Image (tube, coloured by chain):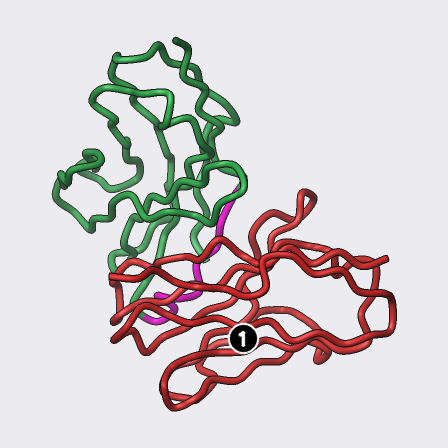
């Protein structure tokens, strides 16, 4: 499975945008990029996913580099409830439900 | 729409016992996957069921098994429990290939 690299931790101020980076230099052409987050004492929560084009939904935006070797999850206005571990995961159609989680990025939001 | 429901939320067992965990997926979802989460190993894939058949299996010993019923509900069984089986067990369901997985809040299993 192609691996992803994320910073261990990041900090943001409340109501400011947050850009969470992810490197996936060995991504294959059929790999989708998924983002999940996990709040304390909860299961992971789906945030967004994409293949090649940038994606937006009510929670966040996903910016994918043209060569697809990196991506950035954008939270437009961080709130205290966004404090969580964010996971960037690659998933291909052959093993779409066998998600391989790395250690993720612990996001701290400061009031 | 109800989310993924896992029962029980907490469970305490002793070494050598066996345990069964239950997962009810989101209505209409036919795929159910199970994961183990520990502080040391993180989130690791156990297995996935689709239409009552195991489709994928992670790298866990045969003491870990599962099944899926015709209504898509799934159970996971762990036999001959070991201290290292203490973990949060998560279940996730999805509707189709490359659709996102929706996780339950897990069963916290503690082995004494």
Q: Is residue A100 magenta?
A: yes
**Chain identifier, green in the render:** A
Subunit of mark 1? B
**Whole-percent x, y for residue B102 in the image:** 35, 58
The quadrant of the image that shows the N terminus of chain B is: bottom left
Residue at x 59% of width, y 64% of height: B8
Question: Is residue A18 left or right of B110 when viewed as pictured?
Answer: left
**Whole-percent x, y for residue A20 in the image:** 34, 27
One can see residue A63 in this view? no
One can see residue B79 in this view? yes
The quadrant of the image that shows the C terminus of chain B is: bottom right
Question: Is residue B17 left or right of A52 when viewed as pictured?
Answer: right
Residue at x 16% of width, y 38% of height: A58
- The residue singled out by tag 1 in the image is B57
Q: Nearer the viewer, residue A63 or A35?
A: A35
Q: Nearer the viewer, residue B3 or A14?
A: B3
**Chain identifier, red in the render:** B
Q: Is residue A103 above or below residue B60?
A: above
Q: Magenta span covers which residues?
A: A94-102
**Whole-percent x, y for residue B105 in the image:** 48, 53
């Amino acid at each position: 499975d192609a691996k992803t690299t994320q910073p261990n931790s990041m900090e943001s101020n409340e109501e400011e945008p947050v850009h969470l980076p992810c490197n996936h230099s060995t991504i294959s052409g059929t790999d989708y990029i998924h983002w999940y987050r996990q709040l304390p004492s909860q299961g992971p929560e789906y945030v967004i996913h994409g293949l090649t084009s940038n994606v937006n939904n009510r929670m966040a935006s996903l910016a994918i580099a043209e060569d697809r070797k990196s991506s950035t999850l954008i939270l437009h206005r961080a709130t205290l409830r966004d404090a969580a571990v964010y996971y960037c995961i690659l998933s291909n159609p052959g093993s779409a439900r066998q998600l391989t989680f790395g250690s993720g990025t612990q996001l701290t939001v400061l009031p | 729409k109800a989310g993924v429901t896992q029962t029980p939320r907490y469970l305490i067992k002793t070494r050598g016992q066996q345990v069964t965990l239950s997962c009810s997926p989101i209505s209409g979802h036919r795929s159910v996957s199970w994961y183990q989460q520990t502080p040391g190993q993180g989130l690791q894939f156990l297995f996935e069921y689709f239409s009552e058949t195991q489709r994928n299996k992670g790298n866990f010993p045969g003491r870990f098994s599962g099944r899926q019923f015709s209504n898509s509900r799934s159970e996971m069984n762990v036999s001959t429990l070991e201290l290292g089986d203490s973990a949060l067990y998560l279940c996730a369901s999805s509707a189709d290939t490359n659709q996102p997985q929706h996780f339950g809040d897990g069963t916290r299993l503690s082995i004494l």
